[in-house]
Image (spheres, coloured by chain):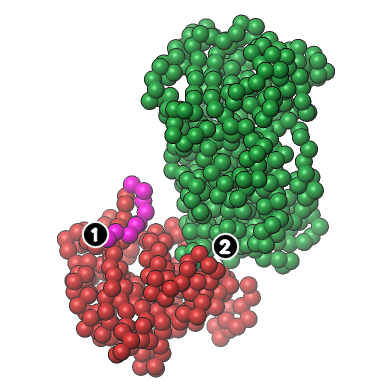
């Protein structure tokens, strides 16, 4: 792939970002936990979008015509699959360094994605609107969850869908997400999460409702140490979980 | 770049076309590169080669729309008899007898000649607009990059895709070019393969005689015909194969026995040196290996094609599921799912058939007594016998959707 339009960045910088892209996309590297979780997250995301917008995942480019925003896009682990399924994708990340990394990888993958260094609030203020907002593993990192979720609501057109995942707050999530993932397995850098920012499913439903969206579904992401894989559960939301909410036709 | 597909398949035998059909059914675009002339694949004459398709493999071919085209040419295997024997002595008193009436799924397998299966697969490929055939063509180089893989053909043309699959057999060039080494050994045995016409009907019964130099399998074909896989030590096999047809039959007769009456050769005679060859990895960067390219096993249990088709079902399912999630189908974590699914299973089977061969291919009286008692014991226990039947039918383990009769 040529880099003709990547441009305003100097070649040494590009080499650095290429190395970082390779790191983001190495399934056994630094972002291993995200790669392991990704098929399970994608199964949930794709089935919810297909159900909400009446799309058939067995057809080519089932999400064609849908405008999708991926907040906290990182290296593009969710943005790229969504673009491959035909969605018109905008990826936003508050960490400026992620943007050129994600851009370089999308180009290598032959995908067209609009990556921007911006926030949900700034995009909402600009008047940007989407059919789908992906808000995965972000809400536990923001200072004011209600203000943030309200911005997400404003980013949706009526009839739009928001998918939001986070980590539950209880003794088990402390043990697995912080002690387990950060200290024992070293899957995540220490200090990645602050346990008191974790949100229970009831609290999240309440926040989403106050932000002006209607929660319609929630599922747990459950890790099975025998098969070493994640799966979706309707009952077990004790650690990682995901929700789907829709914006009513009348706002 | 001359063309771009989602998946490039190298090898147009049986597994390659089956994989192409499965992936195309899943909505993906496939280019298959075959070394042989398309005309030779589309209309092969009768050459004596035939396969014992397990029930699960038949279901996969059915789901791919191929089984209906060959069903009329197939012979159901209704019974399997396994016997310990010595040339000229007849069967030992203890033997295993498997009857399809003992499991609910019907015949445990079907015999099908290579010519019918090959033609049906190639016709189905030609009818699918999502599959492009490049043949005859030889791959001389392959190169992976961050977004895909490119192969170069002998005439300089290039083909690109997101994933390359090697279905190019035991001495897979695709594996070698990717630097994947192989582990294995030679058995010092060679299989003599041919088809016979016989006087008396076989009633759909397959026979496996365990003889000291190696097993003799007699597999029923439609009409009064059977396919023979006759294993001898390599030097003996070479000597037998050098004989003319009537002397060849004269050597075979005492081993074969007279239960099917007079026998005569039909079609050509083949020899296959037997070796075990396992690829050290089933996947590499943007590459997956399948069938004999991944695992060439001893043909003792007729499992080569069945194992290959199980790989087809598994790899197609992993790739199609990944594509429907929007994942990069050539990404290492996607390919690892296929390797985890298939590698243990095939390695176990490879070593299992190796062990059975070592146990049975000898004339040690102690081992002979032990295996006769073992076979008698299995035969006496219906539960264990039923398990063997289900294993032979390919109904055990983690089955791909296509082998459960479901759509991809």
**Which label is found at residue A235?**
1
Indicate yes or no whether the magenta region holds residue A234. yes
**Which label is found at residue B273?**
none
**Residue A7 coordinates in the image, percent (x, y):** 58, 84
**In front here: B257 or B352?**
B257
**Which label is found at residue B27?**
2
**Residue B251 coordinates in the image, percent (x, y):** 73, 12
In the rendered view, would you say B165 is above or below B371? below
Which chain does the red colour mark? A
Of labels 2 and 1, the one closer to you: 2
In the rendered view, would you say A109 is above or below A115? above
Magenta-tinted stretch: A226-236
Indicate yes or no whether the magenta region holds residue A134. no
**Residue B361 coordinates in the image, percent (x, y):** 58, 17
**In front here: B302 or B113?**
B113
Which chain does the green colour mark? B
Q: Residue furthest bottom?
A: A126
Chain name for mark 2: B
């Amino acid at each position: 792939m040529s880099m003709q339009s990547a441009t305003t960045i100097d070649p040494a910088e590009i080499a650095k970002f290429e190395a970082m892209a390779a790191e983001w996309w190495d399934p056994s590297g630094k972002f291993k936990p995200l790669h392991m979780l990704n098929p399970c997250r994608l199964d949930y995301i794709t089935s919810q979008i297909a159900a909400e917008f009446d799309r058939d995942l067995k057809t080519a480019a089932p999400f064609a015509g849908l405008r999708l925003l991926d907040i906290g896009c990182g290296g593009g682990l969710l943005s790229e699959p969504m673009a491959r399924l035909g969605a018109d994708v905008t990826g936003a990340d508050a960490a400026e360094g992620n943007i050129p990394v994600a851009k370089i990888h999308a180009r290598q993958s032959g995908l067209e994605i609009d990556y921007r260094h911006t926030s949900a609030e700034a995009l909402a203020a600009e008047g940007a609107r989407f059919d789908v907002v992906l808000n995965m593993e972000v809400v536990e990192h923001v200072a004011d969850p209600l203000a943030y979720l309200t911005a997400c609501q404003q980013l949706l057109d009526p009839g739009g869908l928001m998918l939001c995942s986070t980590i539950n707050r209880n003794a088990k999530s402390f043990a697995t997400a912080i002690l387990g993932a950060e200290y024992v397995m070293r899957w995540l850098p220490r200090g990645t999460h602050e346990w008191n920012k974790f949100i229970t499913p009831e609290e999240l439903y309440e926040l989403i409702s106050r932000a002006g969206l209607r929660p319609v579904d929630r599922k747990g992401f459950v890790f099975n140490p025998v098969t070493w894989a994640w799966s979706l559960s309707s009952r077990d939301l004790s650690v990682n979980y995901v929700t789907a909410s829709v914006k009513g036709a009348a706002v | 770049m001359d063309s771009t597909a989602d998946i490039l398949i190298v090898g147009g035998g049986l597994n390659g076309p089956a994989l192409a059909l499965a992936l195309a059914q899943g909505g993906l675009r496939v280019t298959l590169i075959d070394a042989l002339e398309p005309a030779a694949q589309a209309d092969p004459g009768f050459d004596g080669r035939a396969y014992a398709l397990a029930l699960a493999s038949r279901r996969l071919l059915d789901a791919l729309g191929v089984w209906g085209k060959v069903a009329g040419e197939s012979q159901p295997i209704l019974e399997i008899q396994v016997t310990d024997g010595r040339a000229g002595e007849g069967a030992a008193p203890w033997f295993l007898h498997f009857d399809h009436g003992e499991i609910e799924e019907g015949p445990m397998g079907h015999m099908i000649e290579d010519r019918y299966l090959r033609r049906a697969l190639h016709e189905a490929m030609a009818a699918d607009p999502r599959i492009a055939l490049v043949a005859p063509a030889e791959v001389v180089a392959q190169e992976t990059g961050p977004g895909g893989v490119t192969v170069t053909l002998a005439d300089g043309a290039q083909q690109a895709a997101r994933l390359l699959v090697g279905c190019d057999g035991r001495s897979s060039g695709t594996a070698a070019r990717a630097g994947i080494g192989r582990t294995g050994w030679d058995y010092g045995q060679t299989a003599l393969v041919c088809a016979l016409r016989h006087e008396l009907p076989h009633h759909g019964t397959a026979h496996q005689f365990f003889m000291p130099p190696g097993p003799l399998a007699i597999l029923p074909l439609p009409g009064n015909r059977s396919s023979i896989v006759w294993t001898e030590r390599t030097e003996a096999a070479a000597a037998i194969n050098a004989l003319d047809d009537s002397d060849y039959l004269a050597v075979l007769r005492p081993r074969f026995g007279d239960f099917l009456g007079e026998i005569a050769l039909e079609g050509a005679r083949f020899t296959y040196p037997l070796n075990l060859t396992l690829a050290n990895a089933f996947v590499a960067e943007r590459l997956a290996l399948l069938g004999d390219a991944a695992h060439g096993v001893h043909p003792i249990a007729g499992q080569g094609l069945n194992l290959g088709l199980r790989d087809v079902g598994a790899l197609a399912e992993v790739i199609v599921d990944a594509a429907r999630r929007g994942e990069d189908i050539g990404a290492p974590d996607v390919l690892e799912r296929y390797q985890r699914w298939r590698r243990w299973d095939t390695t176990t089977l490879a070593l299992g058939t190796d062990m059975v061969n070592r146990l049975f291919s000898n004339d040690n009286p102690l081992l002979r007594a032990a295996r006769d008692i073992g076979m008698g014991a299995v035969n006496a226990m219906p539960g264990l016998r039923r398990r063997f039947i289900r294993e032979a039918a390919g109904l055990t383990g983690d089955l791909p959707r296509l082998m459960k009769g479901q759509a991809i």
